[in-house]
């Protein structure tokens, strides 16, 4: 067999996974078939008195079912058939009359985790992580996980694992009862064998004694497992899922239904049949296909370098400097130190420097409180940050990120100054959100070492970084910056220099349209709900303007309007908003109101009166609002991609929109959404809007060409 081997150790059988063509073990149909045959062999042998299941891969057990296969499933019947094969194999394993020990070494995910549930003893090495992350792909555990896990760890534990897809390290898995023991990796093999021998000698499986739960906890657990208690748990779980998913993701609700209908209620056969039926319903949804597509995009990114030539290797970045310790500089410094890079931070005054240090410390303190890092890690991270008011220490840095105020003259002057204090090979990146990288590079003696690295706010939360290639930026600089962004845990997308780069270029027309809709008499609630509650954006455009700062957003809108005069109309209320000091979250008053802790407390009811406009008439339908916002965005995306070649392919647009703006992943991104409507329909609607709402909606030539040829972005 190619991928799974059976070792005969006398009375102990060892089945070892070692996929021939893969770096990690994946439960594809062919691997499952091989495994099934070996389980049958063990079943039919009179010699074997115990079975150990392990992996030959150095750092992982089994990372899950084959997602490529899952992506291609389009028929529910085929899916049920596929699941039946896996169910039969896992049932045969579960029914073997001998002890079955899973020796888990590293990642044990999805289908791999479901496989170990069919064993009756699980030992995890101390580096292991276990998870059922299927909901992140729009599906749920379909190899019996929804049936076996609640039986093993109880209802609450199982729901927390299945409905969220969270990762459990070995220690946490032990506490949950998912594994029976944790041992050092180096001892795993030897220990599993000695345990198998012990079970054979004693003729039974001896589980380690568990620490007794405190009296009250024990009784609460007993209650929550009772008929009445379970109803409470299901109700709470459903509320939690709806809060998290806003009802847009069917998989966790389907998983909940499976567990609710089967746990403590029915036979294994009936339960598995129901699991397969519900699984086949979700696997064919576009939600699942989009989430799997996104998974593959991020996987592809892991192998990319940002440049086409495979000859160019990124240079290592061990020491870095950040210029400007404000909102963005502070966030970037924290992120870099978090990834063990030495960071020198420079600002004009001590106050900004200490604010940046406090900010980083507050984030690490939170991580420490959540037991994500130890006190030692927190202190050593802090030790990686140092501050200065001059350029001392810059001479040793490999990379500098400039995050001073958004002003071309100031930026140019600090870049020229900084170049005198850094080595020739040092790369200088600007975090500008709107200025030309090519123009800024003129201030640097080595423009090939100059690049844009646009982080999004808040830096520690937003996954996207736009890597902006100036006209003279070298491939080496792009590759190094791309690798650095990945090292910092971000998703880099390489874009060409141009107004707003990619994400802001698409977001700004959307924000501008929202302001116009507001001016025309639509309420704040209705505008924002059309995009967030009804469509799935994390927040509506007016709430986003508050977040960015009304004055900042309007300043950028004017810049855009000056560059794309026919495509953007700035609402006449904009300047009035700033004049009336309605500045958004930072001023605690914008389209919404905020408390002293900057928490949003609802729509600002006085905004209409303050701006001297009447109460909203709300004459438009939600769909009209949505179309005005998104069709203008799609129009701009078509220009950016197909005409100005800001990025190379539609995947880049979708990835950037999902990671940089939170565009709903279940819709697959802006251009997948556009394709679902069709270019012909969009062009027709844009033409209607051009006649009714204004010239700015005129469909661009590339979109019209697509419509004419009935083509799609993908
Ligand atoms: N805030 C955002 O949401 C956001 C998002 C993406 C990009 N950006 C961009 O990041 C950059 C910084 O924005 P910010 O919001 O962090 O600004 P900020 O005003 O919070 O911080 C700027 C910092 O730069 C310092 N500074 C000014 N001149 C300096 C100099 N010569 N040397 C050293 N320090 C100097 C200031 O003292 C201040 O601490 C801008 O280019 C902005 O467009 C901002």
Image (tube, rainbow, N blue to C red):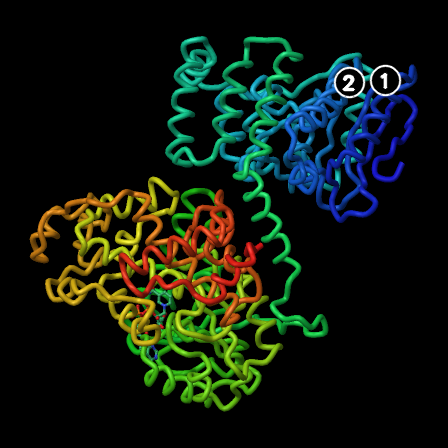
Disc 1/disc 2 C-alpha distance (Å): 8 Å
Q: Which residue is mark 1?
A: 43
Which numbered circle lies on residue 645? none
Label 1 neighbour load within 10 Å: few <14, some 14-19, many 20+: some
Above or below, 401 relative to 119: below
**x, y (%) of residue 603?**
18, 46
Report if the beta carbon of the residue with label 2 is closer than 8 angstroms to ligand 1. no
What is the quadrant of residue 152 in the picture? top right
Residue name at image x 43 percent, y 36 percent: 248
- Quadrant location, the C terminus: bottom right
Q: Which residue is mark 2?
A: 92
Residue name at image x 17 percent, y 51 percent: 521
**x, y (%) of residue 481?**
55, 71
Disc 1 secondary structure class: helix
Above or below, 128 relative to 216: below
Q: Are marks 1 and 2 in contact (CB under 8 Å)?
A: yes
What is the quadrant of residue 473 in the picture? bottom right
- Left or right: 574 in relation to 63: left
Nearer-N-terminus badge (1/2) = 1
């Amino acid at each position: 067999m190619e991928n799974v081997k059976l070792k005969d150790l006398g009375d102990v059988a060892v089945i070892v996974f070692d996929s021939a063509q893969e770096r990690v073990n994946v439960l594809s149909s062919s691997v499952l078939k091989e495994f099934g045959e070996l389980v049958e062999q063990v079943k039919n042998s009179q010699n074997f008195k115990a079975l150990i299941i392990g992996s030959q891969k150095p750092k992982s057990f089994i990372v899950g079912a084959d997602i490529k296969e899952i992506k291609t499933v389009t028929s529910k019947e085929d899916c049920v058939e596929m699941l039946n094969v896996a169910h039969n194999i896992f049932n045969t394993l579960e029914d073997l009359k001998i002890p079955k020990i899973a020796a888990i070494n590293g990642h044990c995910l999805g289908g791999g985790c479901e496989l170990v549930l069919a064993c009756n003893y699980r030992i995890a090495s101390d580096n292991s992580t276990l998870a059922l992350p299927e909901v992140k792909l729009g599906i749920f555990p379909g190899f019996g996980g929804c049936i076996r896990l609640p039986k093993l760890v109880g209802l609450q534990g199982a729901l927390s694992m299945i409905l969220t897809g969270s990762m459990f390290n070995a220690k946490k898995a032990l506490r949950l009862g998912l594994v029976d023991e944790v041992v050092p990796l180096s001892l795993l093999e030897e220990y599993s064998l000695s345990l198998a021998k012990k079970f054979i000698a004693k003729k039974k499986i001896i589980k380690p004694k568990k620490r007794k739960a405190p009296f009250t906890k024990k009784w609460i657990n007993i209650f929550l497992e009772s008929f009445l208690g379970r109803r409470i748990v299901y109700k709470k779980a459903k509320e939690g899922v709806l809060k998290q998913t806003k009802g847009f993701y069917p998989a966790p609700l389907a998983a909940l239904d499976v567990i609710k209908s089967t746990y403590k209620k029915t036979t294994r056969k009936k339960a598995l049949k129901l699991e397969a039926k519900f699984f086949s319903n979700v696997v064919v949804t576009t939600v699942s296909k989009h989430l799997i597509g996104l998974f593959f995009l991020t996987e592809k990114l892991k192998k990319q370098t940002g440049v086409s030539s495979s000859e160019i290797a990124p240079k290592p970045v061990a020491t870095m400097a950040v210029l400007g310790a404000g909102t963005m500089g502070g966030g970037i410094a924290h992120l870099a130190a978090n990834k063990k890079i030495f960071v020198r931070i420079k600002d004009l005054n001590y106050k900004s420097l200490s604010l940046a240090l406090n900010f980083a410390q507050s984030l690490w303190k939170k991580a420490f409180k959540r037991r994500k890092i130890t006190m030692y890690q927190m202190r050593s991270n802090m030790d990686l940050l140092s501050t200065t008011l001059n350029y001392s220490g810059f001479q040793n840095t490999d990379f500098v990120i400039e995050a001073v105020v958004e002003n071309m003259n100031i930026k140019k002057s600090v870049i020229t100054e900084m170049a005198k204090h850094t080595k020739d090979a040092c790369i200088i990146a600007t975090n500008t959100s709107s200025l030309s990288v090519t123009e800024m590079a003129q201030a640097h003696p080595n423009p090939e070492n100059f690049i844009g690295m646009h982080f999004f706010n808040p830096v520690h939360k937003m996954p996207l970084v736009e890597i902006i290639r100036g006209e003279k930026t070298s491939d080496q600089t792009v590759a190094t910056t791309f690798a650095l962004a990945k090292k910092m845990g971000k998703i880099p997308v390489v874009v060409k220099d141009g107004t707003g780069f990619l994400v802001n270029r698409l977001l700004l027309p959307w924000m501008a349209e929202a302001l116009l809709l507001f001016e025309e008499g639509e309420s704040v609630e209705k505008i924002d709900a059309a995009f967030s509650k009804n469509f799935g954006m994390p927040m509506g455009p007016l709430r986003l303007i508050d977040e960015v700062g009304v004055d900042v957003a309007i300043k950028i809108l004017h810049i855009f309007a000056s560059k794309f005069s026919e495509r953007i109309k700035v609402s006449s209320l904009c300047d009035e908003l700033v004049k009336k000091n309605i500045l958004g979250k930072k001023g605690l008053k914008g389209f919404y109101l905020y408390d002293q802790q900057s928490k949003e407390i609802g729509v600002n009811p006085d905004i209409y009166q303050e701006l001297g406009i009447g109460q909203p008439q709300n004459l438009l339908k939600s769909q009209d609002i949505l179309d005005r916002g998104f069709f203008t965005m799609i129009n701009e995306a078509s220009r950016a991609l197909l005409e100005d070649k800001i990025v190379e392919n539609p995947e880049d647009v979708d990835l950037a929109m999902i990671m940089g703006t939170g565009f709903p992943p279940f819709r697959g991104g802006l251009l997948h959404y556009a394709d679902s409507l069709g270019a012909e329909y969009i062009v027709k609607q844009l033409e209607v809007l051009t006649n009714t709402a204004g010239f700015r909606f005129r469909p661009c030539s590339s979109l019209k060409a697509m419509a004419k040829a009935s083509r799609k972005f993908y």
